């Protein structure tokens, strides 16, 4: 039996509103990608993920790929109301390396999944032009400058591996528009000198590596990976720079404050090289 997953009426309405906002040929490409989708998964209450499958494997057609090949691109959002529910909903739409992949709702849409015709759209916003050719790899500085300030102190105490050159300012600004949160100021100072590195069991992500995760209550952007099951992240749509410890084995998010430096120092073991 041929397997076919379908969008529900709410998802169809959201996609229609976004397509109406897009100009050709972006609209045409999106329609062609949507036609290829034959598996839709909803792993959580607020997330819809889309796949084109053949013989049990994901299939990507290069001839319908958007020129913008950013690893994870929040390219559009839609805000709407339902006449018998007082709160406003919002939904973000994502491309992954040039292909439509997911929709993430701000709140659990279970009660309104079949009310696509009843919603009232208040805003449709496009953040990026998916037709603008952008490489998967950001443009970086060609050489390192010696570390200074706190980062120099850190390097004096610990072995820093996997260092990546800073991203050029214009490219960094573009990437930051893809993140709907205020990042901690100390983190932004950090990536001015090194755009990601590894210290002991902590992998500090650069601007180009930040990715979103969907948790039961809120969405987050990951800044630090700790081993295989924990991360430090900022909450989406936040303005305070507060970071949270997320444990994917089931614990509730733990707020850690907004001092990136203090969090790093608390995570590290005693110095692994002599001062």
Image: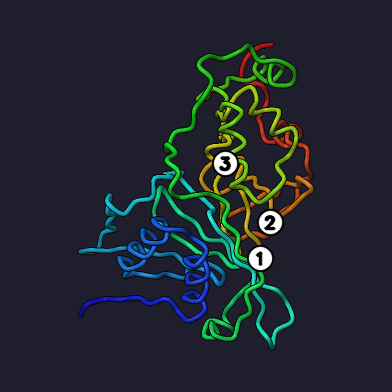
Q: x, y percentage for residue 252?
A: 67, 60
Residues packed near mark 1 inside 10 Å, few (<14), some (14 to 19) or many (20 plus):
few
Give left or right: position of 114 versus 6: right
Q: In the structure shown, which secondary structural element does the residue marked by tag 3 occupy?
A: strand
Q: Nearer the viewer, residue 4 or 269?
A: 4
Q: x, y percentage for residue 122?
A: 66, 71
- Pick the quarter of the image with the C terminus: top right
Q: Is residue 263 above or below residue 7?
A: above
CA distance separating discs 2 and 1:
10 Å
Q: How is the image coloured?
A: rainbow
Give left or right: position of 173 versus 260: left
Q: How many marks?
A: 3
Residues packed near mark 3 inside 10 Å, few (<14), some (14 to 19) or many (20 plus):
some
Residue, disc 2: 253
Q: x, y percentage for residue 145?
A: 61, 12
Among the two numbered marks 2 and 3 on one chain, the one whose residue lies closer to the N terminus: 3
Among the two numbered marks 2 and 1 on one chain, the one whose residue lies closer to the N terminus: 1
* Residue plotted at (58% across, 28% down): 195
* Residue plotted at (65% across, 25% down): 192
Residue, disc 1: 217
CA distance separating discs 1 and 3:
20 Å
The residue mark sitting in front, 1 or 3, is 1
Q: x, y percentage for residue 39?
A: 34, 69
Q: Nearer the viewer, residue 182 or 171?
A: 171
- Picture quadrant of residue 106: bottom right
Q: In the structure shown, which secondary structural element does the residue marked by tag 1 occupy?
A: loop
Residue, disc 3: 225
């Amino acid at each position: 039996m041929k397997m076919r997953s379908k969008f529900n009426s709410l998802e169809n309405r959201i996609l229609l509103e976004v397509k109406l906002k897009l100009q050709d040929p972006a609209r045409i490409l999106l329609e062609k990608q949507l036609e290829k989708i034959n598996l839709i998964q909803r792993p959580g209450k607020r997330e819809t993920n889309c796949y084109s499958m053949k013989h049990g494997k994901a299939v990507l057609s290069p001839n319908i790929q958007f020129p913008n090949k950013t690893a994870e691109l929040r390219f559009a959002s839609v805000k709407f109301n339902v006449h018998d529910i007082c709160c406003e909903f919002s939904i973000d739409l994502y491309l992954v390396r040039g292909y439509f992949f997911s929709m993430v709702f701000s709140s659990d849409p279970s009660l309104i999944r079949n009310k696509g015709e009843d919603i009232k759209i208040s805003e449709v916003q496009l953040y990026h032009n998916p037709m603008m050719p952008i490489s998967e790899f950001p443009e970086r500085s060609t050489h390192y400058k010696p570390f200074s300030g706190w980062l120099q102190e850190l390097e004096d105490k610990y072995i820093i591996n996997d260092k990546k050159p800073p991203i050029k300012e214009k490219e960094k600004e573009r990437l930051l528009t893809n993140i709907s949160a205020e990042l901690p100021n100390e983190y932004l100072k950090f990536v001015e000198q090194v755009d990601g590195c590894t210290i002991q069991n902590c992998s500090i992500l650069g601007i180009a590596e930040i990715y979103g995760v969907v948790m039961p209550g809120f969405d987050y952007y990951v800044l630090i990976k700790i081993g295989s099951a924990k991360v430090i992240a900022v909450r989406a749509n936040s303005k305070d720079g507060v970071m949270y410890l997320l444990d994917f084995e089931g614990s509730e998010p733990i707020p850690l404050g907004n001092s990136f430096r203090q969090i790093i120092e608390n995570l590290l073991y005693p110095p692994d090289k002599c001062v």
